[in-house]
Image: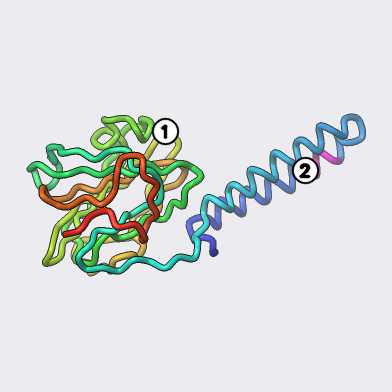
Amino acid sequence: MTIHREGFPSIAISAVLFIIINLLSFAFISAAVPFLAWVIFAVTLFLLLFMISFFRIPNRKLTVDAGAVICPADGKVVVIEETDEVEYYKDRRIQVSIFMSPANVHVNRNPISGEVLYNQYHKGKYLVAWHPKSSTENERHSVVLANDKTTILVKQIAGALAKRIVNYLHVGQKVEQGRELGFIKFGSRVDVLLPLGTKINVQIGQTVQGGVTVLATV
């Protein structure tokens, strides 16, 4: 396991706060109320360890398959439905949405190899990530990837806690399946919009792994 580069500033700040809070706690509280000082220590240690865990990158054997669309994120499948895609394709698409809780790995990965045709950031609201309107009204970053087999739109969507979406791609870039697409901080959702007729390999409620689980075959 390694720590994602996006986490270094947040972890450093958390570590400094952990040290300061506990130095003050044991200097001014422990003598009078030792139990409270240890509670503060336990809570702040938990928060520091959570911060480290949030930015983890586990060691995995990534799936590489030209005939497959791989899940771009860890989490739970919360939506599989046909929808009108109005941002880029302007046609009917199959939408598969993956909800990422704060406990999930938050690295986002390219579902396919190909070329970036579209890359656009949208300001928006911070509705809870499972809200039906979060796909179109929340802050989000949309990317269209295409190859000779398929073309898909991937949306990184902010949730009620997610306040920063990071996207590493640009239009015209050639990308590889499983490589990093971006990162979302603190709870979020990723939508994948696929052509009608695409065979979906996941089910509602299924727990998936980014870069590993086959979402669909093309």
Query: What x and y, as percent, mark residue 217?
Result: 20, 58
Residue nearest the viewer, comparing 50 with 214: 214
Tell me the kind of residue under disc 1. Ala
Q: Quadrant of residue 36?
A: top right
Residue at 23% x, 55% y is 216
Residue 31 locus on image (x, y percent): 92, 35
Query: Residue 66, how many percent across, how many down?
Result: 21, 68
Which secondary structure, mark 1?
A: loop
Let me know if residue 121 appears in the view: no
Q: Earlier in the sequence, mark 2 or mark 1?
A: 2
- Label for residue 160? 1
Q: Which mark is residue 134?
A: none
**Does residue 218 sit above or below 93 in this rendering?**
below
Q: Residue at x 42, y 33 (%)?
A: 160
Q: Quarter-wise, where is residue 34 in the image?
A: top right
Residue named by callout 2: 22
Do the residues under discs 2 and 1 have CB atoms within 8 angstroms?
no
Give above or below for 173 relative to 209: below
Left or right: where 107 falls relative to 19: left
Rounded to the nearest angstrom, the CA distance separating label 2 from label 1 is: 30 Å
Question: Label 2 is placed on what type of residue?
Answer: Asn
Indicate whether residue 23 is drawn in magenta: yes
Question: In what quadrant of the picture does the N terminus appear?
Answer: bottom right
x%, y% of residue 205?
A: 36, 40
The range drawn in magenta is: 22-26
Note whether residue 59 is visible: yes
Q: Is residue 141 left or right of residue 93?
A: right
